[in-house]
Structure formats: structure tokens, C-alpha cells
Amino acid sequence: MRYLHTMVRVSDLDAALHFYCDLLGLAEVRRKDNEKGRFTLVFLAAPEDETRSARLKAPEIELTHNWDPETYDGGRNFGHLAYEVDDIYALCQHFRDNGVTINRPPRDGRMAFVRSPDGISVELLQKGEPLEPTEPWASMENTGTW
């Protein structure tokens, strides 16, 4: 058995790609438009997984965009996506500078949660040892749900 991908339905493909690619740093590795089924699949991989993704088509996130409008709620009903990051403080600041709410700030220098435009929880975990707790993160309260 091997992990292939996690599928996430998105209502606005451009907003989702901005979040996952421009802000989180994932790369689009392939895309498939299905005229008959009226949907687009976009597969994304983390930078350190791009080569493996091209060869094995894993591990990836599959963004599914149905062309006919639908309302997706819950988001958290499947759990969350998780990524190991080089500098949790720098990435959280990047998100914050771009208007993304940090739902669970990295108070401990190890873990944070944000949400995609479609309400999908994304866990960020510091690679290696936790960073030294520092402000403004150390005293920042949770916002919303994560």
C-alpha cells in the first residue's frame, strides 16, 4: 500500500490555487479537464515531493473543481492536511501578510493551523525541533476553529 493523494473539493479554483500554490508553496504537477463530467482536477505536490510526484503520481493533493456551482460546507469533516515546513514563523507571517487568518498560532514554535478559502484545515509542523517560542506568536490566541 502507498499513499496517493487527498481530494479536496474547491468552489473557486483560482482562489484555491492562490492559497495552495502562491501562499503555501505547493506546485501544480498536472491538470485534467473533463468536459463530459464538467470538472477539473488539479494535482499539487510539495516542493520536496515534486520529483517523486512526477514519477509515482504521489503524494499529492487533488483539487476537484466542479464547473456547476455547489456549496461545500464542513471542510473539517475529513480531518486536515499536514505539511512539514522549514520555518513555521516565516510561513505564518507570509500567510498573515496575505490576509490569511492563523486559526491556531505557532505558540510552541512547532504547530499552527490555517484554513483554505474553502474551509479546509491545514496543519503546519516545524521541521526538526520546535523553534524557540517568540512574539507575536507566543501570546496570540486561537481564532475561529481549526
Image (cartoon, rainbow, N blue to C red):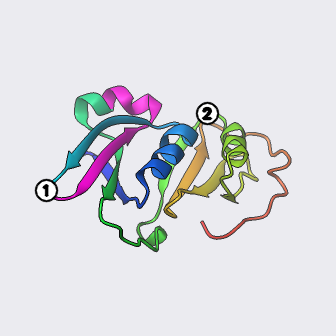
Is tag 1's residue or tag 2's residue first in the polypeptide sequence? 1
The mark found on residue 137 in the picture is none
- Position above or below: 101 against 20: below
Q: Residues within 10 Å of mark 1 (few under 14, many from 20)?
A: few
The mark found on residue 36 in the picture is 1
116 vs 82, nearest the viewer: 116
Residue ID at (54%, 38%): 22
Residue 62 is situated, as x and y percent measured from the top left of the image, at: 33, 49
The quarter in which the C terminus is drawn is bottom right
Residue ID at (55%, 42%): 24
Residue 44 is situated, as x and y percent measured from the top left of the image, at: 38, 41
Q: Secondary structure at mark 1?
A: loop
Q: How far is disc 1 from disc 2 in space, using C-alphas? A: 41 Å
Residue ID at (52%, 64%): 119
- Magenta stretch contains residue 40: yes
Which residues are drawn in magenta?
37-52
Q: Is residue 35 visible?
A: yes
